[in-house]
Amino acid sequence: MGLFHETLDSFDDLFSHQLQDVYDAEHQIMEALPLMAGAASSSDLKNAFNVHLMETREQAKRLEQVFKLLGTEPKRVTCPAMKGLIKEGNEAVTATGDPKVKDAALIASAQRVEHYEIAAYGTLRALARQLGQDQAAALFQKTLDEEGNTDKKLTRLAESHINQEAAAAH
Ligand SMILES: [Fe+2]
């Protein structure tokens, strides 16, 4: 979550800050996913990253719908936590070595990103409900479901074959 450069006088302020933060995070992820897909060697992992890139574009649009519901323009406030997570992911992207081990490292980074997003959207859903913004809460729920599914898909890929192949590397 970004630093609070603005005042938090109201629950609405908190909601809009959280919204701008995750909107920035989604944009960072949109830039990172093509690099992760490019760095993956397993075709199903590559595919998972590409599918999630398409989902992420939709998630950003969903956030724009929430801004609209609030009667505000979409705005990004830098999310330093996502910067850090992506920086770590970039270490896996640029690493040399065995491609299968790299795939396992890419999954490790991507799941950290998913869990951060799951936390962020869970909070946003709760804030929206408290504010009586049921339409916004439903949009957050949709994204939460996608993030959860992506996380599970990555676990399946790791446990079905990628970790095994990485462990066989030497
Ligand atoms: Fe997302």
Image (cartoon, rainbow, N blue to C red):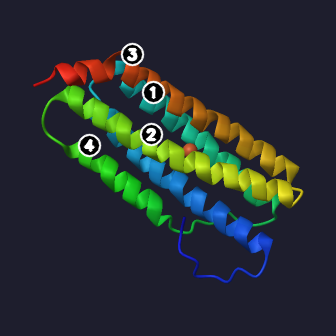
N-terminal of the pair, mark 2 or mark 4, is 4
Which residue is pictured at 68% across the width and 49% down the height?
Answer: 122
Q: Is residue 14 visible?
A: yes
In this rendering, the answer to whether 132 lies above or below 15 is above
Label disc, if present, on residue 111 of the rendered structure: 2
Q: Please name the amino acid that badge 1 sits on.
A: Thr
Pointer 3 residue = 160
Residues at marks 3 and 1, CA–CA distance in whole angstroms: 8 Å
Residues at marks 3 and 2, CA–CA distance in whole angstroms: 16 Å
Q: Determine if the C-beta at disc 3 is less than 8 A from ligand 1.
A: no
N-terminal of the pair, mark 2 or mark 1, is 2
Pointer 1 residue = 155
Q: Quadrant of ligand 1?
A: top right
Q: Is residue 42 visible?
A: no
| Percent x, y of residue 5 | 57, 82
Q: Are marks 2 and 1 in contact (CB under 8 Å)?
A: yes
